[in-house]
Amino acid sequence: MDERTQSELEAAVFRRLVAHLRQRTDVQNIDMMITAGFCRNCLGDWYREAAAQKGIEVSKEEARARVYGMPQGEWKQRYQKDATPEQQAAFERSQKTHS
């Protein structure tokens, strides 16, 4: 497979992942962090870092909005729930395990 095709496939996979996460508003970022070690915010940050490597400036808010499909604050207001004590404890354990 040539490099261009590989890059196009990877971009398609990223778009599909983002579309999937936009549909799965029931999946909270803290749950993603506990089980996968990354969340929607991480994807936005990685997007911004990739843009910076190409000399393109993308704000943190803009990059995260590309992942959320709306401003992050709006998504949080609509869909984010307060983390339960169990989620917070699991998150703390996951950070110690993967640090």
Image: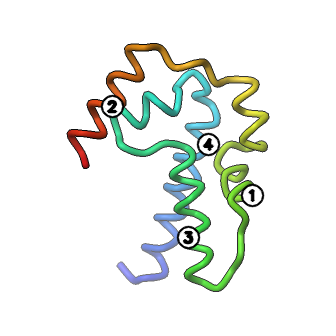
Tell me residue 80's x, y (percent): 64, 24
**Mark 1–mark 4 distance (CA, rounded to whole Å):** 17 Å
Judging from the image, the colouring scheme is rainbow
Residue at horizontal 54%, vertical 59%? Answer: 12
Residue linked to disc 1: 62
Residue at horizontal 61%, vertical 26%? Answer: 25
Residue at horizontal 78%, vertical 44%? Answer: 71
Residue linked to disc 2: 92
Tell me residue 85's x, y (percent): 42, 14
Mark before the other along the chain sequence, 4 or 2? 4
* Mark 1 neighbour density, 10 Å: few (under 14) some (14–19) many (20 or more): some
Tell me residue 27's x, y (percent): 52, 26
Task: In this rendered view, identify the residue nearer to me: 5 or 22.
Answer: 22
- Find out whether the residues at labels 4 and 3 contact each other: C-beta distance under 8 Å: no
The secondary structure type at the circle numbered 2 is helix
From the viewer's perspective, is 65 left or right of 2? Answer: right
Question: Which of label 4 and label 3 is nearer to you?
Answer: 3
**Mark 2–mark 1 distance (CA, rounded to whole Å):** 29 Å
Task: Say if 3 sits above or below 58 in the image.
Answer: below
**Mark 3–mark 2 distance (CA, rounded to whole Å):** 26 Å
Residue linked to disc 3: 49
Mark before the other along the chain sequence, 1 or 4? 4
Residue type marked 1: Glu
The secondary structure type at the circle numbered 4 is helix
* Mark 4 neighbour density, 10 Å: few (under 14) some (14–19) many (20 or more): some
Mark before the other along the chain sequence, 2 or 1? 1
Residue linked to disc 4: 19
Mark before the other along the chain sequence, 1 or 3? 3
Task: In this rendered view, identify the residue nearer to me: 36 or 88.
Answer: 88
Residue type marked 4: Ala
